[in-house]
Image: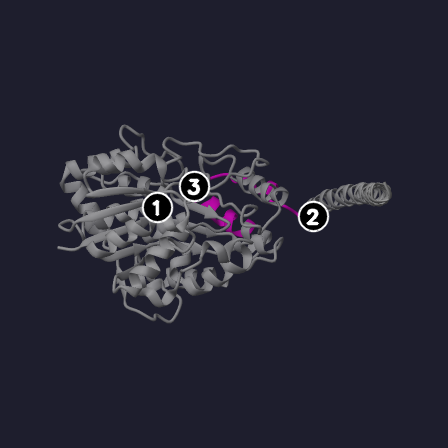
Amino acid sequence: MTTILFACGTEYHVLMAFILATTTYAESPKILLLYATNRTLPYLERARASGIWDEVILIEPDAPATAYEALWADLLTRASVLHMFTWGFPHFNTLMAQGHAGGLSVILTDEGLLTYSPRRHFADWIAQKHDGATLARDFTFEAIQEIWLLAPALFAETPWCPLRAIDVSTFVSRCREYSSLRACFERLFDLENVEPVSAEAVYFRQYFPLLEVLPPELDAWLDDALTTVFSAVRLAIKNHPAWVNPLVKQVGNNFPAADRPWEALVLRAQMQSPEPTSLPRVYLSLTSSAMLKTALLGVTGTYLFLHRLLARYSGWQDTSIDDLIERLSANFPHARFIVPANWEDLSTVLAELDRHEGWRFNLNALPTVADEIAILRDVSLTYWRQSREQARRLQSLEHEVHTLRTQLDQKDALLREVVRLMTLTADILKQDLGNG
């Protein structure tokens, strides 16, 4: 029986690997490859202790490619399938390319938004990130032979290979039936004795400044507006595990186990016996895969996709999100998917939600045109001042360079004169010795 490889670079990859390892590949030998990051290292020893995988191997990001040549060669003699999730981990891309050349079956596996329109997101990612091409080296779509998704019907591109659904419902049923499997799941994701999420709404943060999509000042301003509007509602704020803007006013992660994968919390609620634990009814984000996956896991409620608000202040546009939301509405009638076009539209939506839920939103906190002008002026002035300061520093450096160059030229001229005099002296000594 050949081995199954899982190449995981985030905690969500580990979650998908656990689901597949305990359902589709329950009887197969399995190896978990963990890219060593602050998001995956907490799972290293727990994954080894779980007994789910036959081997758990840590991959160091900064190691040279040659460091893993022998390991890849060994794995490719044993493995028949590689589950890849994304293209941002160079060593995994190398394994993918070598495996494809050797006949390994490469499966692109659900990672969130990008997996539903991968070619478009790949092109955007390469264009936006200054190191995108370097990180994505060796990645090739031609190597992918299948794509496994939570909801294949949402795939927004023309498929070039077969699509397959990941059967999460079977996983949840097994966890409800077998307490040992549920306990293993809870240990791996550190969810033992954790209270359910007690909130009416969930706000998922994103890391736009890190993506070079939005200045941190604007990101914090948008964040403050949204959290203030929901201030009278029990709002759970889920920080993105990659980065949190230090300028935001609300710290976030304000509920038990908030630093665990959100999707794991959702699944844990669903697998409780005899009845699943209730979850929040409203979800909002400027753009978040976690919010999308909440819907894909069958959670009912109202989903507010606020990416068009972001587009007012950034050149960033992701039209694939709109395509995806249309498909969500058609395939998940248990939920409401709303895309406000602007702040006025959001105000109308929240007023209706206010009546429906019996809440009291602070609609006065929504930005006005005057607020937008003020923040854009402040951000503009901030960056103008920074550019002026940088210009002054550059001018000062240019002056220093000119001074150093002048000093260097003077020393060079002095050195040439010394050499000339030494040569002249040597010639005179030779002449005197010859005459003597």
Write down the region rendered in magenta.
347-370
Circle 2 is placed at which residue position? 376
Q: Residue at x 50, y 55 (%)?
A: 132
Q: Secondary structure at mark 1?
A: helix
Q: Secondary structure at mark 3?
A: strand
Q: Nearer the viewer, residue 68 or 394?
A: 68
Q: Specify which label sits upstream in the sequence, 3 or 2.
A: 3
Task: For label 2, count other residues whose C-alpha is less than 10 Å away and answer few (under 14), some (14-19) or many (20+).
Answer: some
Front position among marks 1 and 3: 1
Q: Specify which label sits upstream in the sequence, 1 or 3.
A: 1
Task: For label 1, count other residues whose C-alpha is less than 10 Å away and answer few (under 14), some (14-19) or many (20+).
Answer: many
Q: Is residue 312 left or right of residue 385?
A: left
Q: CA distance from mark 3 to mark 2?
A: 28 Å
Q: Amino acid at mark 1?
A: Tyr
> What secondary structure do most residues of the magenta stretch adopt?
helix
Circle 3 is placed at which residue position? 202
Front position among marks 3 and 2: 2
Q: Could you tell me if the residues under marks 1 and 3 are in contact, i.e. CB atoms within 8 Å?
A: no
Task: Locate the C terminus by quadrant.
Answer: top right
Residue 283 part of the magenta-drawn span: no
Q: Secondary structure at mark 2?
A: helix
Circle 1 is placed at which residue position? 12
Using the image, determine if residue 143 lies above or below residue 311: below
Task: For label 3, count other residues whose C-alpha is less than 10 Å away and answer few (under 14), some (14-19) or many (20+).
Answer: many
Q: Residue 8 appears at what percent x and percent y?
A: 33, 47
Q: Residue furthest front?
A: 436
- Do we see residue 21 in this rendering? yes
